[in-house]
Image (spheres, helix red, strand yellow):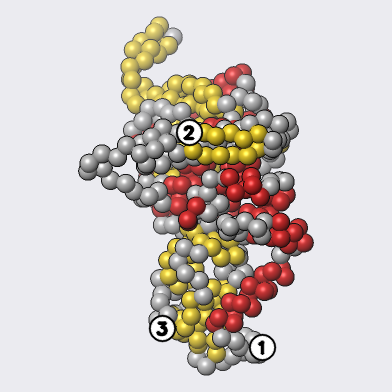
Amino acid sequence: MANFDLIMPKMGESVAEATIIKWTKNEGDKIKIDETVLEIATDKVDSEIPSPFEGTLVKCLFKEGEVVQVGAIIGVISSDAAASVSDAPKTSAPENKAAETKTETIKINAPSQVVANSYKDSDKFYSPLVKSIAKEEGISLDELNAINGTGQEGRVTKADILAYLPMRNKNAGVEIVAPLRAENKPAAATILAGENTVIVNRPAVSVGAGDEIMDMDRMRKIIADHMVMSKHVSPHVTSFVEADVTNMVQWRDKAKKEFEKREGEKLTFTPLFIEAVAKAIKDFPMINVSVDQTGTKIIKRKNINIGMAAALPSGNLIVPVIRNADEKNLLGITKAVNDLAARARANKLAPDEIQGGTFTLTNVGNFGNVMGTPIINQPQVAILAVGAIKKKPAVIETPEGDMIGIRQFMFLSLSYDHRVVDGSLGGSFVRRVADYLEKWDPNRPV
């Protein structure tokens, strides 16, 4: 009988650690190949880890809630298969964990070794990734200790430190707003930025009889931090356009059955919107940019990667990315949209599939809303909300004169970063998207 190590897999180039949410198998349980052993969470997405071996789970080396580095041994599976994978001498499970800890220390590059030594006097636990980021950004131990952590037991996560960085300024105080706490006294956050200290007091929140206090889940905490960070980083402006999309609606109504029968894909409005957005970005490439951490340089993106905001059954939000959307035809976009949406709902997205977006589309019309003022998905500089399509009476110009008719209308609202996108660019871009939708060819081949 041979023992095999269950390894925390690599889940994306920028993902260095994951939190164990739940062991779906207990020690002593039988496991089949590709059967889920545990559920993990990164700061990007939740995932299930399948077993590459068939056998018995003999040891779980980490507890639920613990943060584990990519590449670490997280469990041991005993199998009747021949021990041909490795002829190396086997150690006990605790010895495996200790050995892995030593191995991980060796793998960390020199700067990270310095970081670990630099922050050794702290009473708080910081993951190697957080320490590495802190070292690279020149964050002192006192400053790191002052950052409000949203992880388990107040731990500072990667999302916390990345949300803090854009607001950090060595020459001026920066206000950091943390989530409200359900307490009967004001909560205060102390943030050290260079030579300045800012103390932000939040209002007391009373708890009445019958009120229910619920902890935010991990994803909701990340969303909350990201939204607060975005509003602090970018001065938001929103421009609105109302578009007559009658031709587009009629074309889809006529084409959707044939499209699904031939391609095996449902044709929703979302791919039509994404196609129009990609075309408009080609016309106005300065909407497809980011601002670097110094706030003084603009990064013009080569690729057009459109994020598609999707609501999960839990009520949380996730934004899978359609890469190189401008290079795909309508069928390609439709397949990407349907695949990503289905796997988002099933919690099957890989971390890389929600990274690298350069522009985001959110469909508030799905909830019957006619318009919205979305918050920018950092580090992007713009996000487009599309509202519900409604029938309205409208004046129609004809050769015989003006007439009243029933048309299909929708609102488009573009929120943009006023540091780099002025009203002229923002307004022109959203108008161009509307133009592509309004000028839809009703005779377009399916």
How many residues crowd around disc 1 within 10 Å: few (fewer than 14), some, or many (20 or more)? Answer: few
- For label 2, the SS is strand
Whole-percent x, y for residue 141 in the image: 66, 50
**Front-most of residues 298 and 396:** 298
Cα separation between marks 3 and 1: 24 Å
Q: How many numbered marks, from 0 up?
A: 3
Residue bearing mark 2 = 201
Up-down relation of residue 277 to residue 239 (above or below): below
Whole-percent x, y for residue 163 in the image: 58, 42
Horizontal arrangement in the rendering, residue 311 relative to residue 146 (left or right)? left
Q: Amino acid at mark 3?
A: Gly
Outermost residue toward the top? Answer: 401
Quarter of the view holding residue 180: top left
Residue bearing mark 3 = 28
- For label 3, the SS is loop
Closer to the N terminus: mark 3 or mark 2? 3
Up-down relation of residue 394 to residue 92 (above or below): above
Closer to the N terminus: mark 2 or mark 1? 1
How many residues crowd around disc 3 within 10 Å: few (fewer than 14), some, or many (20 or more)? Answer: few
Q: Answer whether residue 435 is visible to the viewer in this image.
A: no
The residue sitting at 40% across, 81% down in the picture is 29
Closer to the N terminus: mark 3 or mark 1? 3
Whole-percent x, y for residue 165 in the image: 64, 41
Whole-percent x, y for residue 247 in the image: 43, 28
The residue sitting at 49% across, 38% down in the picture is 188
- For label 1, the SS is loop
Q: Mark 3 or mark 2, which is nearer to you? A: 2
The residue sitting at 55% across, 34% down in the picture is 199
Q: Are marks 2 and 1 in contact (CB under 8 Å)?
A: no
Residue bearing mark 1 = 88
